[in-house]
Image (tube, grey):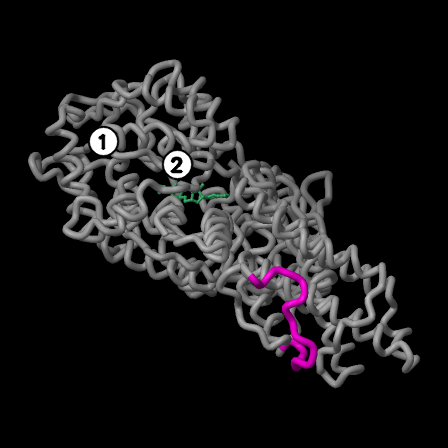
Amino acid sequence: MKDKKYYVTTPIYYSSGSFHLGHCYTTVICDALCRFKRLEGYDVFYLTGTDEHGQKVAERAMQAGKTPQEFVDVLYDQITKLWDLLGIKYDKFIRTTDAYHVKAVQEIFKKLYAKGDLYKSEYEGLYCTPCESFWTEAQLVNGKCPDCGRDVSMSKEESYFFRLSNYQDRLIEHIKSNPDFLLPQSRANEMINNFLKPGLKDLCVSRTSLKWGVPVTFDPNHVVYVWIDALSNYITALGYLSDDTSLFDRYWPADIHMVGKEIVRFHSIIWPAILMALDLPLPKQVYGHGWLLFEGDKMSKSKGNITDPFDLCAHYGVDALRYFLLRDVPFGSDGVYTNRSYLTRYNSDLVNDLGNLVSRTTAMLIQNFDGILPANDTPAELDNELIQMTNDLYVSVVKDMNELKVQNALISIFQVVQRANKYIDETKPWVLAKESENKGRLGTVLYNLAETIRIVAVYLSAFLVEAPEQILKCFGEGLPKLFENEVVFGKLKPGIHVSRTEKQLFPRVNIEKELIAMEDRLLSLQKEPKHEQLETTTEVKEEINIETFAKVELKTGKILDCEKLQNSNKLLKSTVQIGNETRTIVSGIAKYYSPEEMKGKDVVVVTNLKPAKLGGVVSEGMLLCAEDTSGNVVLLSPEKAIDSGSKIS
Ligand code: MSP
């Protein structure tokens, strides 16, 4: 099966914080791709893991009062729990602290040094600590790190350097002559024009200031710094330079390295150059996908705009989460997450279209045929379009998946679902059921629906993890191993037993109510995190200067009126006088203050906060509160009476 092997990797995830919905994106996409390839008969190897070394990890561990190893162990537990919850079927999970990886990285370092690809020198440059990257002046954006927007500082130290500059021409040549190597095409142009053509600098690949990393065996003051350690995971996981290289021999080169767009440079320039230096074949493809944005920004913990995948799964199910990520984001581009778009997608596609189709069809089969699948021996012209569309799916879905157009593949599958619902409206089975002479036709209609649903579930088993199995069970079928023989209309034999799904596939949600509930949960998560995984790190906020602090406008205010928000047991809506103006401010403090207690209080208000909808009401500021470690919350007030609207500085 060597020719049908398929080796897919996600980036290894930083073990320095908790994981949010944006992190699930790469893994869910790769999981769907791997499931699909397995169904096509490929021998798939899916690798994911954690990036556990580096300065940021060491700092976070210290802040949390843990050793770096203890710290990354907790993160490892969290991420594997998350992947299990999302049904991610990886074949191997690599941790960069795994002994075999450490050993192989040391060997790689030695090998590159022996070949003359590494040399010792001194590095001086602008360094971004959180991103562990040196930047040139020209690469900074407004004087800040181009990746994370934070401050950089001048740093100098003895380092080993990788002769990246030697590989510049070969890299340009490779990208140009292999149009599928780096996709989407826009990323290839970006790499060539912004990085390769202006000229590559040799790369600093060891540090003396850092201790939490892989030690350089022949120069123990140095530890291997990020690039060679992290990127090599793709080959060390397969046993490269170990006693058993059978996986490496079988699966390398990778068929696809799936990465977010911000790390395309590392994967399409640095990594291929390292591989060239090691005389190894390059991955067949690097695909740089877009970001999941939240309120116009990349979803990230530091920006405070995270969405908790555990919460979404607990309330709407894992399939809703997977479906949203796979269906809502045009692959390659950025996509936007909002609670509303999430719930709307859920209600319209999963509840209305798919859930409804399955429940109507199985109910009619049980009601009219005692759950015994009738024969399809009374065909009509009307049936052909549905049957044709279902049979045609294979070609279009395979093409879309080969081109990584995951969204399009799902659109085509759901077009068949919608066509089947339309077929119900056209054939009116409830009318056919009234006349016994129409029983044959009714049977055929229901057979066609059952068969369409079965085939749809076979395809969906590459994308979703719960519903397909439940649906197939209704027709006595298990999950498919291969598409072959499963996706051609007519497999179901008349006479088989049909049942309803054991539980309702996708219960409908009331979007407006649910939006309030989601905000409530977010507020309580921020106050009292439900999951261990969100609580493991004590985040110490980065230092800011006085100019940054001065951007926050604080004023005194007086609460004129206050009421509890309907549908929420957390939110209070206050009318606050601030000098000459009055504002509506929503606060998550109903647990600590009654509306009556709030009235008349002097408070401290953040007045230049961007208005935000909370509990369906636009909140025009924030009341400052203090919270102790036991979770007691009190409002802050000026120490003596002072006019409302007084500036606080
Ligand atoms: N450790 C490096 C990768 C080294 S690979 C040799 C890293 N880790 S990460 O945890 O920051 O990111 C892991 C993956 O999650 C990346 O592909 C990244 O693009 C993806 N995402 C993190 N936030 C994201 C969004 N908001 N949206 C989509 N994907 C994003 O980078």
- The residue lying furthest to the bottom in this view is 370
Q: Position of residue 538 (x, y in %)?
A: 36, 53
Q: Is residue 111 magenta?
A: no
Q: Which comes before the other along the chain, label 1 or label 2? A: 1
User: What residue did someone put label 2 on?
Assistant: 284
- Assign a secondary structure to mark 2: loop
Is residue 616 something one can see in this rendering? no
Q: Position of residue 93 (x, y in %)?
A: 32, 55
Find ligand 1 in the image and state its quadrant: top left
Looking at the picture, tell me which residue is in the foreground, 291 or 468.
Answer: 468
User: What residue did someone put label 1 on?
Assistant: 279
| Residue drawn where x is 40% and y is 28% of the image | 145
- Give left or right: position of 502 versus 539: right
How crowded pointer 1 is (Cα within 10 Å; few <14, some 14-19, many 20+) is rated as few
| Residue drawn where x is 42% and y is 65% of the image | 630
Label 1, label 2: how far apart the Cα atoms are: 15 Å
| Residue drawn where x is 39% and y is 16% of the image | 138
Looking at the picture, tell me which residue is in the foreground, 588 or 563.
Answer: 588
The tag on residue 65 is none
Looking at the picture, tell me which residue is in the foreground, 624 or 302.
Answer: 302
From this view, report whether residue 116 is shown above or below residue 633: above
Amino acid type of the residue that numbered disc 1 sits on in the rendered structure: Asp
Q: Position of residue 430 (x, y in %)?
A: 87, 74
- The residue lying furthest to the front in this view is 377
Amino acid type of the residue that numbered disc 2 sits on in the rendered structure: Lys
Secondary structure predominantly adopted by residues drawn in magenta: loop
Q: Is residue 500 magenta?
A: yes
What residue span does the magenta drawing correspond to? 485-501
Task: Report the number of numbered marks.
Answer: 2
- Give left or right: position of 164 versus 301: left
Is residue 389 something one can see in this rendering? yes
